[in-house]
Amino acid sequence: MQAMFSTRRARIRKATRALSREATIDNYVALAKEYAALNQPAEVLEVCKEGLELHPESAELQRLALAAKDLHQQLRLDTLRAEIEVAPRAALYRELCELLLEKGDAQRALESATRWRSQTEEPEAVYYVAAANAEFFFDGRRSRDGLLAFQLAVQSGKSMAKDRRPLRLQFEIARRCGAWEDARKALARLLELMPGNPLLEARFRRVLANCAHSRPLAKALAEVERSGRFVDDEPEEAGTFDREAVRPLLKELASRPEVHVAFFLRGNTALVQGAQGPTADRTARAVREILTASRSSARRMALGRTLEIRAEGSFGTLVLKPGTLGTAAVWAAQIPDGPIGQLMKDLNGENVRGEAA
Amino acid sequence: MMQEVLQPLTLQAGVRLAAVISGDGVPVCVLERSSSGTDEFVDCTTSSQPSLEGQRIDPASLVALAASWVDDLMRAGGQIAWEIPKRFVLVASQGTLVVQQGPNAHVMVVLEMSAQPEDFVLPLEAAVERLHRLLRDLGRFDPDQNAPALPRPSAARATAVPSLSEHAAGDDPGRSTLTDTTGGASAAAGGLPNGTTGSAQHDTPGDH
């Protein structure tokens, strides 16, 4: 074991020397990989960060940095959880909740903050419960999550008068659902804490202009849940799409032997391949009803944003995949396999988004 | 007794909640995983409040909403004369819901994002079978009432069991749609939610 470590260290020294001679992507990657082999994610992250400053376009360094960050966070989370079991205190809970929210794990953040709150009743714990609920609202658009997050943010804001975070949270929730009056109040108090901040002042002027058509918070939240959209989201009905770009993909989907009918839905328009006439109309209408009902139910059941809907029976399988460009759906003889899933992702725009990410 | 129907499901990794619900959405038995980090499940059948740490919706509401979702889907499927689906899956960003039709009731599970709904096909079918057996032993199972939801011999399907298609108006669109597909025909259908908006237009096959 000792020999293996000394060999590794020698390889790190060699990689470091190579990097100091020539700061190329390959040399950065080589050094980062040596640290990764020693299970030192913090060092990997440092090397990648330095490399990305010189070579921001490097996909390999970006991938390594992401993997190292994930591992680093996971190790830190494990340490924090273990320390909390032994000696729970605010600083540990704060870091744990921040890390979980940063990782996008709102459920675990909510559980940790709820536990913290039940142990100490600290206002900061209340803020993190609010923040976790706000994440659920931003993702799933369930009005109850939004309302609870806002109310808890107000509650924690009263106890943490000098803290900007509860006010920022109130502002963000109110702004996204169009409750401009509530957004204005939160911004006014933020401006009291940060007088003269040009960004806040510009925002305040914009919000003030919108106050004429402000809605009460509860109503605005209910509207977000009903429509599934925030005020600044592009309305799906108004969104146009290139039918000529969609048709070849839809045709390819319908030509698969196991697919009976393929659909593409966006707003009030449905393209159907594999059925025609009244049958196409009726089937498209049914598929749209299934989509609408499922989206709304997923929100109300606190499951979040709908990613896939499936109904299986003696008729085969109906699969709907909502995406950024619209919803791809197939009625197939069996559960669609990999290539069909890929085609559906190409259709609904999820592949494009995945590649960009 | 109902817990025995669900118990094996709770042993599967990734299950957050397992429930038996009556067709009209009344929770018969609801088991929810405790948030204490252990694999214990709490019987929440009579709970009307989110009682667990970090819980965001009370189990009674969740199962009622799930039953309502299944109803909505069956109603939508009814207009295209499909037989009643036996399994429904809703994959969402914060969890997955799988509902399996059973005799006079549904068996449902809510899964973590990491769990694959495909892994629950057999466990859910087994749970429905256990429910089936339990109701038969209790003398409460009327097979005629649940015919479309249960496996049947294929020879009997055509003659003995009425399907939704018999109640729907007109011909069997399932068959005609299959014919259309092989013919390579296509259509652009205007979506008509509630029959009020949008416009219907049909392309000729020559357009493609």
Image (cartoon, grey):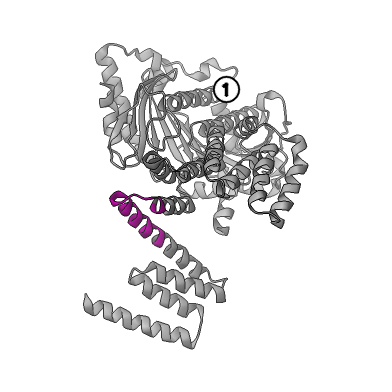
x and y, in percent, of residue B134 in the image: 26, 19
x and y, in percent, of residue A18 in the image: 44, 86
Check the image and report above or below for B80 versus A355. Answer: above
Q: Nearer the viewer, residue B37 or A351?
A: B37
Q: Which residue corresponds to the image point at 47% horizontal and 66% vertical from the top-left?
A: A65
Q: Quadrant of the N terminus of chain A?
A: bottom left
Left/right placement of residue A242 relative to residue A8 reads right
Residue A240: quarter of image: top right
Magenta segment boundaries in residue numbering: A72-92
Residue A209: quarter of image: top right
Badge 1: chain ID: B
Q: Which of B64 and A335 is in front in this view?
A: B64
Residue B44: quarter of image: top left
Q: Can residue A120 be seen in this view?
A: yes
Q: Which residue corresponds to the image point at 35% horizontal and 41% vertical from the top-left?
A: B14
The residue that mark 1 highlights is B79
Q: Is residue B129 magenta?
A: no
x and y, in percent, of residue B106 in the image: 39, 24
> Total label count?
1
Check the image and report above or below for B37 versus B165. Answer: below
Left/right placement of residue B152 relative to residue A185 reads left
Q: Can residue A55 be seen in this view?
A: no
Check the image and report above or below for B131 versus A56. Answer: above
- Dominant SS type (magenta): helix
Q: Quadrant of the C terminus of chain A?
A: bottom right
Within 10 Å of disc 1 (Cα), the crowding (few <14, some 14-19, many 20+) is: some
Check the image and report above or below for B163 versus B58. Answer: above
Residue that protrudes farthest toward the bottom in the picture: A21
Residue type at mark 1: give it. Gln
Q: Which of B72 and B57 is in front in this view?
A: B57
Q: Does the magenta stretch include residue A75?
A: yes
